[in-house]
Image (cartoon, rainbow, N blue to C red):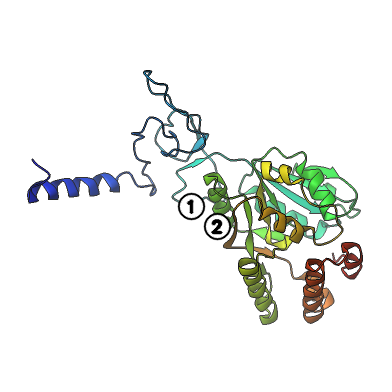
Amino acid sequence: MSPESPAGFLAYFFAFIITFSFTDKAPGKILPVNRNRNNCNACRRACRFSIPRPKGKPARHCNCPGTVINSSRKPVAGEQKIHFSFHPGSEPPSDFIIMPLIKVSVIIPTLNEASVLASTLETLGKYKPCEIIIGDGGSEDGTQAIAGKFNIRVVTSPPGRALQMNAAAGLARGDTLLFLHADSIMEPDGYWKMVRLMAEGRIAGGAFSLRIQSARWSLRLISRVATWRAKYLRIVYGDQAIFVRGEVFRRMGGFSPIPICEDMDFFNRLKREGKTVILEEQTTTSPRRWQAEGVLYTTLRNWLIAGLFLLGFPPRILSKWYLAIR
């Protein structure tokens, strides 16, 4: 049947639709057959892991570290099959049938965080990251004991979030580093969205939108303003859970050893290393600072510190205006 004829055209059209439907990445389906021998055999495209086919020799599979998650089909060369037992509500999205295998190292700076650390570690454990490392600045309230109950590695350093996060990140083995505050909770959709984007290899890093865990209208407004600030001004705070590629972090030299605004400084430098994203998905942080110091005072003080820092005011002086609230 000739494709130029009307009947032939319809036949080829419906054959294409049927073929496309059965090769979509919807639940229970698989990716298209890898017809280009030089393409990655895990993601079916010419990615950075692809191995060119030697001229005149049989096709070679690439070594892209793909992952088949809870799929019934057999993994092909360059893939490995993994069966995770996720907690209800923490599973990856249904189209996460195949994805490149990346290792996520979660870095948590702590200083007397015993009141909130357990819930954060319990939530993170559901996502099964490569590792969780705590950078502790000398806690005296049982923070390290709580980490021990979860079999979490603790690295001690002088107090200061920049120093603590650098010390913990120096021991991280992950391809992606996620810096999370001890009083912040990562939602499933946000975590898996981050994994997907970092697996694609097109961004250097990013952060999440912010949600303050409170029903007060004033704090809900502050959350929206913070998300707008990050999205349009690209000014990001640490409670938005910054994530970055491990090699990029090392190339940048980690966080600058300053006593305050290390998060803003880091993200400003990160933007020069490649594309960054602010995810619509949120990380939820505790309202304890606003509750302890007052919503209006805390907000104005934070804006003043951020503005003066961007204008070049010495962080050593700015840090005296920011008390530790636990």
- The local secondary structure at tag 2 comes to helix
Type of amino acid under label 2: Asp
**Marking on residue 93:** 1
Residue drawn at x 69%, y 81% is 218
Q: Residues within 10 Å of mark 1 (few under 14, many from 20)?
A: few
Q: Which residue is mark 2?
A: 189
Find residue 112 and report its horizontal and vertical position in percent. Answer: 86, 57
The answer to whether 171 is drawn above or below residue 263 in the figure is above
* Residue 250 in sight in this render: yes
Q: Could one spot residue 146 in this view of the protein?
A: no
- Tell me if 19 is positioned left or right of 170 in this view: left
Residue 124 lies left or right of residue 94; in this view the side is right
Are dots 1 and 2 in contact, CB under 8 Å? Answer: yes
Distance from label 1 to label 2 (Cα)? 8 Å
Mark 2 crowdedness (10 Å alpha carbons): few <14, some 14-19, many ≥20? some
For the residue pair 132 and 60, the one nearer the viewer reads as: 60
Residue found at x 39% / y 47%: 25
The amino acid marked with disc number 1 is Pro
Give x and y (percent) for residue 122.
Answer: 69, 52
Q: Position of residue 19 (x, y in %)?
A: 26, 44
Q: Viewer-proximal residue, 239 or 122?
A: 239
